[in-house]
Image: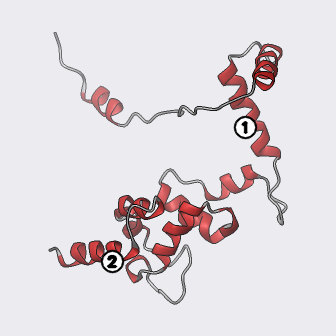
Amino acid sequence: MGTKKPWKLRREVRKLPRSINVAVRLDARLKFASDLGARVHNNQTLSSFIEWALSRTVRELSIRSTTKTVQNVVDEVWDIDPADRLIKLAFAYPQLLSYSEELIFKAIKGHPAFWTSPEKQSVETCKLKNVRAAWEHLTKIGNEESTESDLAKDIEIRRTGG
């Protein structure tokens, strides 16, 4: 049998999931309504109907104190890299950060390794490469599994190569 063509191998390695699974709990009445909605809306599966309904909702749901919808914000801050996405969201819409994201952003703001100009912090002065490199540790801070002082030690070890 032949070997796989090089272009086939690259394609398999780069394959990213198109969607994720989410477990939701619906009461019986809402589940029934969703099933009926799926039938009425082009006889879709329940998951396709829920995805359509969520997509429609984010396009219509307004964010308080702005004229923007959730979809407008997504379009503005979306990045495939979660570190980049967090930085963009934190500067544009800090009120939308979750508690975990607030912890991560506080750690980023508090360390000079993440800024070209620590006194003038912005998306433009953020060293995103450094944030990406520390992302695993930063998510531990967000999950309250690590501390900012542990992050500082980790960055110092990386900087000195020791």
Furthest residue in direction front, as rendered:
27
Point out residue 93 in the picture as x, y percentages from the top left corner.
Answer: 68, 66
Label 1 belongs to which residue?
A: 55
Secondary structure at numbered mark 2? helix
Q: Which numbered circle lies on residue 39?
A: none
Q: Amino acid at mark 1?
A: Ser
Q: Is residue 40 above or below residue 154?
A: above
Q: Which numbered circle lies on residue 152?
A: 2
2 or 1: mark nearer the eye:
2
Q: Is residue 71 above or below residue 67?
A: above
Count of marks, rendered view = 2
* Side of 86 where 141 appears, left or right: left
Residue at coordinates 46% horizontally, 74% vertically from top-left? 107
Q: Is residue 155 above or below residue 40?
A: below
Mark toward the start of the polypeptide (2 vs 1) = 1
Residue at coordinates 81% horizontally, 48% vertically from top-left? 61
Point out residue 9 in the picture as x, y percentages from the top left corner.
Answer: 28, 29
Image marks 2 and 1: residues in contact by CB distance under 8 Å: no
Q: In this rendered view, identify the residue nearer to me: 20 or 71.
A: 20
Q: In the rendered view of the protein, which quadrant contains the C terminus?
A: bottom left
* Side of 151 where 101 appears, left or right: right
Mark 1 burial class by Cα count in 10 Å: few <14, some 14-19, many 20+: few
Distance between the alpha carbons at the discs numbered 2 and 1: 40 Å
Residue at coordinates 72% horizontally, 24% vertically from top-left? 49
Q: Amino acid at mark 2?
A: Ala
The image quadrant that residue 58 belongs to is top right
Q: In the rendered view of the protein, which quadrant contains the N terminus?
A: top left
Residue at coordinates 30% horizontally, 29% vertically from top-left? 7
